[in-house]
Structures are given as structure tokens and as C-alpha cells.
Image (spheres, rainbow, N blue to C red):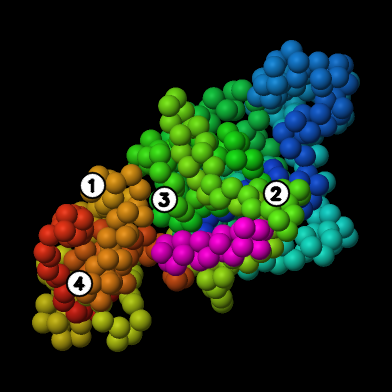
């Protein structure tokens, strides 16, 4: 086995995962991304730069690292106090005058300096992302057209690459009534709003308090889409936090999680290398989780594999989000004249134009979205849990078996077992939900029992 074979196998695996998920991947971006494409600092390097910029910090950074045993949150808290002392003394001219009003918290000074330092970041090279190899990587990355990007970075290195994506900063995500497509979630804040930065101990305590609500909001992303970590080490606390959330919320067991990858840079790879395809991470007391691992000295082939399903062309994501924000009711239609299989019992019969109209034109309406949620209350992961499995792919295998035996793909349409709830106008911007009937059907298949399928052709508009 060699690295060429490794690349072929990883590429094929990514293709299979994307085909099964039928949606674009989610990218989770860390400081290594900014380090690679803009020579940005990691956390320790940022603290060192802050120490050098503040005369009030009169000892070498090594002193603080030694004293606080490498606890960067604690060091951040100490530096926060020292920056405030400097600002109110000899450093007053270094900061905007309005910051000296009592309405601003004392942390504003160091966060202003962080924004100032990171605001200087620009792509390596003049107007480019450095050498030709990095340019090729960036081109391939842009062609991925991820469903969304989640990042803990404060900087604005990634925003220019996805100019039509909407930036959502910090806890603003909690105020969103929907998750659409084409968002950059900056969960640790952004330099454009210095006070949003999650930096010191107090910030992280508040973040941890709100974290469960943030995780619940993003849970569908984590379990329904391929998720790729870029710019993190496999043992990074941010990765472990996400995996711990997945474990606690959906009961992921010790088996391999098939839709989560960590992409790591390894400059030592040679043509004879065959790196590990997965890693086992400890995410809590007696809790170990296996995820897929990708090692590469160049990310171009990986990004090409992630974008091989085809980018979302000619989609105006800004318009899409605007339409969603202004919509009171969700309107859903499939391709004209496409037959969609659905059990009429799940549809609302009190249509103003009457049921005969619906039968004549193959159209009906469902004006109450809660009724859909009542009938189709499971994600595929929850279906798997009902069947006693640890992860969604086992339930998906049963669906594949039904298709092989009967030719009926229950995920391909709206029917008694499954429905696609669009979260946007673009293909792939959907949430797949499943009914109790689906659980019963898959249980029969799992147990090797005879089963029959409920089919009824109808074209549907939900409003």
C-alpha cells in the first residue's frame, strides 16, 4: 500500500458519504487554516504578540506559561487586567477615546488590540494565497461550496473566499429563526466586533453556559451533513467538544462515525506513506469516539474530492436567505410533473379548494408545519437509535436493502416513511425527517420479517 492508493481510497470514501448524505459538507475551520493561508498566529503566538505590545506585561511570556501551567485562558485573563491598567495609564493614546466610558467593560482594551493585530492579516503573497500550490488549494476549496462554515477563528481570512455567504457572529446564531445555506458561523466571535471575542476565563465560562443551546441549534448540521475539520489537530479541544455533543445528544457509540473527518497537514508524507484512516479520541470519562482521519501534505486533492458532487451553481445565497427571513410560511414544490409518493392521511384535508381539487391536480397544502413535525418526528440518527443502533448509517443500510429488494427508494421522495423539509431553495438545502411507519418498516427488515410498502403517487405543495 502506498500514498497513491491511500488517496484513491479516501477519495472514494468521501464520494460515498456525499452520495449517501445528498448534501454539501459542513466545514469546521480552525487557526491552522489562517496559519497556512495567511501566516496567522495560533493561540500561544497571539498571546506572545499581545505580551510584546503591552509594556505593562513586563515579564517574558515563558514566565506566565510556566506560572499558569500553559493555561491560555488564565493567561488571557491576566493579560486582560494588565491591558486595562496600561490603557488607563501610559497607553491611553493607543485606544479609542470612547472606550474610557464606564459603559465599556475592562476587557475592551485587549480585545481591541487583538482585532488590531489580526486585522493586519492578509493572504501570503501580493494579492494571492501564496505559492501556486496554495492557490490551487484555495481554488479547490471554493469549488466545494460548503453548506455552511463554522469557525473558532477571530480573523477574517476565510470571508473573502465565500463572499456571498452571510457571517453570523457569536450568539447571534441563537436569534436566528432558521438555518439556511451559505452561512459562516463565527462561534468565538469576530474582530469586526471586538467585544464578541471569546478570549479569557470569564468569556469561556459564559460560552460554556450557552454552549448547550448553540450545540442544539447546530446539531442537525453535525449529524445530517458530512463534517470536515480543517486547521485543527485531531486532539484539539474544539473537536472533542463537538464529538462530545454528538455523543451526548444522539448516543454515538464506540464504532466509527462515518460522516466526520479531520484533515491534518503532514509534510513528512512520501510516495510510500499510508497514513491511518481513522483516529480514536477520548472526549470524556470512559468515552472514546472514532472518526475518519485524512493526512495530506497538499490539501488540493482533498478539497477536490469534497467538491466532486458539483458546486451549487447560480445560487444567490443572499437572496435565498432574504426570502427565508421574509417568509411566514414555508412553500415547497418539487420538479413539475414529478410524481411524489405520499400517504394522503398525512395531509391536511381542510383545503379551501377542496380535496377533489387536490386529487385532480395532484396538489394539496399543509399550512401547519407542526403537523409535519408530528408525523415525521425522527432524524435518521433517531431512527437508528429506535432500532438499537449507535449511528445513522446502520438505518441507512436497511433503506438501501429495501431499494435493492423492491426498487423503492424511500429517501428519494415524500411518502409515508420520509419527507424532505427544505431549509432553502437550493438543492441539498434540506432536512430529512422520518415517520413512525419508517421505524416499523426498518425494524421488520432488520428482523428478517416480511414487509409491505405503502405507496401513493401525488405531487405536493406545502405552504
Q: Which mark is residue 265?
A: 2
**Observer-nearest residue: 163 or 282?**
282
Q: Gap in Å between the C-alphas at discs 4 and 3?
A: 25 Å
Residue 166 among those drawn in magenta: no
x 56%, y 77%: residue: 314
Callout 2 touching callout 1 (CB < 8 Å): no
Residue 15 among those drawn in magenta: yes
Residue 199 appears in the rendering: yes
In the rendered image, the quadrant that contains the C terminus is bottom left
Q: Gap in Å between the C-alphas at discs 1 and 4?
A: 23 Å
Crowding near the residue tagged with mark 3, few <14, some 14–19, many ≥20 C-alpha atoms within 10 Å: many
Crowding near the residue tagged with mark 1, few <14, some 14–19, many ≥20 C-alpha atoms within 10 Å: some
Callout 4 touching callout 2 (CB < 8 Å): no
Residue 439 relative to residue 128: left or right: left
Residue 119 appears in the rendering: no
Q: Nearer the viewer, mark 2 or mark 1?
A: 2
Residue 127 relative to residue 229: left or right: right
Position in image of residue 329 (x %, y %)? 32, 64
Position in image of residue 166 (x %, y %)? 58, 57
Callout 1 touching callout 4 (CB < 8 Å): no
Q: Which mark is residue 386?
A: 1
Q: Gap in Å between the C-alphas at discs 2 and 3?
A: 25 Å
Callout 4 touching callout 3 (CB < 8 Å): no
Q: Nearer the viewer, mark 2 or mark 3?
A: 2
Q: Which of marks 4 and 1 precedes in the sequence?
A: 4
Q: Which mark is residue 223?
A: 3
Q: Which of marks 2 and 4 precedes in the sequence?
A: 2
Q: Gap in Å between the C-alphas at discs 4 and 2?
A: 47 Å
Q: Secondary structure at mark 4?
A: loop
Q: Which residue is mark 4?
A: 342
Amino acid at each position: 500500500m502506498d500514498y497513491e492508493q491511500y488517496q484513491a481510497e479516501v477519495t472514494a470514501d468521501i464520494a460515498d458519504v456525499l452520495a449517501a448524505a445528498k448534501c454539501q459538507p459542513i466545514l469546521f475551520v480552525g487557526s491552522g487554516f489562517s496559519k497556512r493561508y495567511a501566516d496567522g498566529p495560533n493561540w500561544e503566538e497571539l498571546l506572545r504578540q499581545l505580551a510584546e505590545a503591552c509594556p505593562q506585561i513586563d515579564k517574558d511570556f515563558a514566565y506566565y506559561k510556566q506560572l499558569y501551567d500553559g493555561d491560555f485562558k488564565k493567561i488571557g485573563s491576566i493579560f486582560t487586567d494588565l491591558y486595562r491598567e496600561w490603557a488607563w495609564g501610559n497607553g491611553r493614546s493607543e485606544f479609542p477615546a470612547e472606550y474610557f466610558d464606564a459603559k465599556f467593560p475592562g476587557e475592551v482594551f485587549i480585545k481591541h488590540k487583538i482585532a488590531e493585530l489580526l486585522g493586519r492579516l492578509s493572504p501570503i503573497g501580493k494579492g494571492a494565497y501564496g505559492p501556486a500550490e496554495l492557490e490551487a488549494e484555495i481554488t479547490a476549496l471554493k469549488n466545494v461550496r460548503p453548506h455552511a462554515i463554522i469557525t473558532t477563528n477571530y480573523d477574517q481570512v476565510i470571508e473573502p473566499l465565500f463572499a456571498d455567504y452571510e457571517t453570523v457572529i457569536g450568539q447571534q446564531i441563537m436569534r436566528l429563526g432558521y438555518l439556511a445555506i451559505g452561512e459562516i458561523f463565527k462561534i468565538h466571535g469576530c474582530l469586526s466586533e471586538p467585544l464578541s471575542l471569546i478570549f479569557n476565563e470569564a468569556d469561556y465560562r459564559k460560552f460554556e453556559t450557552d454552549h448547550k443551546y448553540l450545540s442544539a441549534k447546530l446539531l442537525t448540521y453535525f449529524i445530517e451533513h458530512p463534517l470536515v475539520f480543517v486547521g485543527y489537530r485531531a486532539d484539539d479541544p474544539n473537536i472533542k467538544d463537538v464529538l462530545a455533543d454528538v455523543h451526548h445528544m444522539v448516543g454515538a457509540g464506540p464504532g466509527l462515525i462515518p460522516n466526520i473527518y479531520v484533515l491534518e497537514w503532514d509534510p513528512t508524507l512520501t510516495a510510500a506513506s499510508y497514513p491511518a484512516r481513522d483516529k480514536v479520541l477520548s472526549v470524556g470519562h470512559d468515552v472514546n469516539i472514532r472518526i475518519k482521519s485524512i493526512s495530506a501534505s497538499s490539501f488540493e486533492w482533498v478539497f477536490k474530492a469534497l467538491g466532486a458532487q458539483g458546486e451549487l451553481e447560480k445560487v444567490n445565497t443572499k437572496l435565498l436567505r432574504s426570502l427565508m427571513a421574509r417568509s411566514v410560511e414555508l412553500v415547497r414544490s418539487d420538479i413539475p410533473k414529478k410524481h411524489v409518493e405520499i400517504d394522503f392521511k398525512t395531509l391536511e384535508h381542510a383545503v379551501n379548494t377542496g380535496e377533489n381539487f387536490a386529487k385532480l391536480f395532484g396538489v394539496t397544502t399543509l399550512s401547519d408545519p407542526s403537523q409535519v413535525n408530528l408525523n415525521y418526528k425522527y432524524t435518521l440518527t433517531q431512527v437508528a437509535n429506535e432500532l438499537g443502533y449507535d449511528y445513522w448509517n446502520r438505518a441507512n443500510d436497511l433503506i438501501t436493502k429495501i431499494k435493492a429488494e423492491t426498487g423503492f427508494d424511500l429517501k428519494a421522495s415524500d411518502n409515508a416513511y420520509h419527507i424532505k423539509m427544505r431549509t432553502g431553495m437550493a438543492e441539498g438545502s434540506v432536512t430529512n425527517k422520518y415517520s413512525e411507519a419508517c421505524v416499523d418498516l426498518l425494524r421488520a427488515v432488520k428482523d428478517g420479517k416480511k414487509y409491505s410498502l405503502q405507496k401513493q403517487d401525488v405531487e405536493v405543495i406545502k405552504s
